[in-house]
Amino acid sequence: MIRRPLRQIVALGGGMFSMEPHNGLLDKYILDLVPKNKPKICFMGTASNDGKEYRDMFYEFFNKQQCEPSHLSFLEPPDNLEKFILDKDIIHVGGGNTKMIMDKWKETGVDKIMRKAWAKGVILTGMSAGAICWFNDGITNPSKGVLTRLPCLGLLQGSFCPHYDDRAELKSAFHKLILEETIGEGYGVEDGAAIHFVGNEPIRVVTSRPGVTAFKVKKVKNKITETKLDSYYLGRESDIDAINKEISEQTKQIGVLNTVISFIEKINDQDINGIIQLLSDDHKFIDSMGIVVNGKKEMKNAWKLYFKWFPDYEIIIKNTLMTDDSVGIFGIAKGTFDTDELTPSDKFEIPAAWRAKVKDNLITEWQVFADNEVVRDIIKSNGMKSMIKEKVKFLHSLRD
């Protein structure tokens, strides 16, 4: 089975080699996310106009680590930007001017390449402006005293404020723009802290200093609220053990979720062989009326018939809920009956939910929760139409 790569971003409020050259805890945490002996890490100093001093600090630290450091400068770009970026395991974007990042990336097409890199599993990281760029909303000052929204990549929802404990004026502006709804709610991250995202979920806050952390910042009843996020200090052995245990559990859950997402993708592609490959030998299917179908052979025939009726059948995922070995999916089911005399009543789009149980990366149970009355009516109606057509054909043949 093809596994979907993890889409990971590590957004730092401040720190790493440029601010804490003799610490290295956050730098090494990021390197350790790659399951390789010598991960390829690339520095991009776009926000500081590809300044040599910042780049030299990067090499000063990472040349001493078990990795392959490189950099991307737009003053001397590689011949093939996409190939160069997608070949890396980690992309780290330095701090500086966020608008400079977005302008240059859009001009060169790197904004689109970064989306491909994220989807491919390249770990995207950045500090300050280099963290803001991954979010939906940034801040820019087009003229003196004026602050407004800067559209960024939007890989992560909301907004991001770095140096949250050190830059009072930045923190104040961040609060003001959220209150005015110029930007969306987001995260305030202190120097020495980083939020590790998988997809759009902040799975943990890690720190290179004791006592620092990050906050979820939002507008509630015309006031700013800050919710302190739990953090792990990377220099404390007990916290490292807790992280390793959490990573192990999350890796297991991510594997379960990936299996279910792959299964839904196969359904949406009407890939019957792909669907069957993801079923366990003792697979159990439970429909919305409680009817149980056991076994892969029976399910293959059932899916064939269903796709014959509804060749564009699609599951649209709105939300998921996970336990240890199960995933609840909440969303929409839609389809159109395959008929030569299509009417609006031959289409359906209904709220639905599904529960999947997973073992050894296979779906052992798939249960549907939906009011399928409209679907049954479509099948029944078209079944009657089909019978009438056959009867008419038979009568015509008698006349001939």
Image (cartoon, helix red, strand yellow):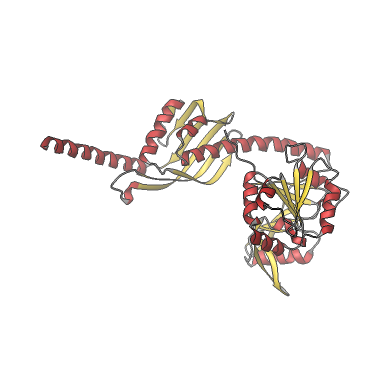
The percent position of residue 174, horizontal first and vertical second, equals 70, 64
The percent position of residue 268, horizontal first and vertical second, equals 47, 42
Left or right of 327? Residue 54 is right
Tell how many labels. Answer: 0
Q: Quadrant of residue 131?
A: bottom right
Left or right of 266? Residue 248 is right
Q: Is residue 302 visible?
A: yes
Residue appearing at x 75%, y 39% in the figure: 243
Image quadrant in which the N terminus is located: top right
Residue appearing at x 77%, y 52% in the figure: 71
Q: Is residue 11 visible?
A: no
**102 lies above or below 342:** below
Image quadrant in which the C terminus is located: top left
Left or right of 17? Residue 245 is left
Residue appearing at x 15%, y 36% in the figure: 397
Residue appearing at x 69%, y 58% in the figure: 133
Q: Quadrant of residue 171?
A: bottom right
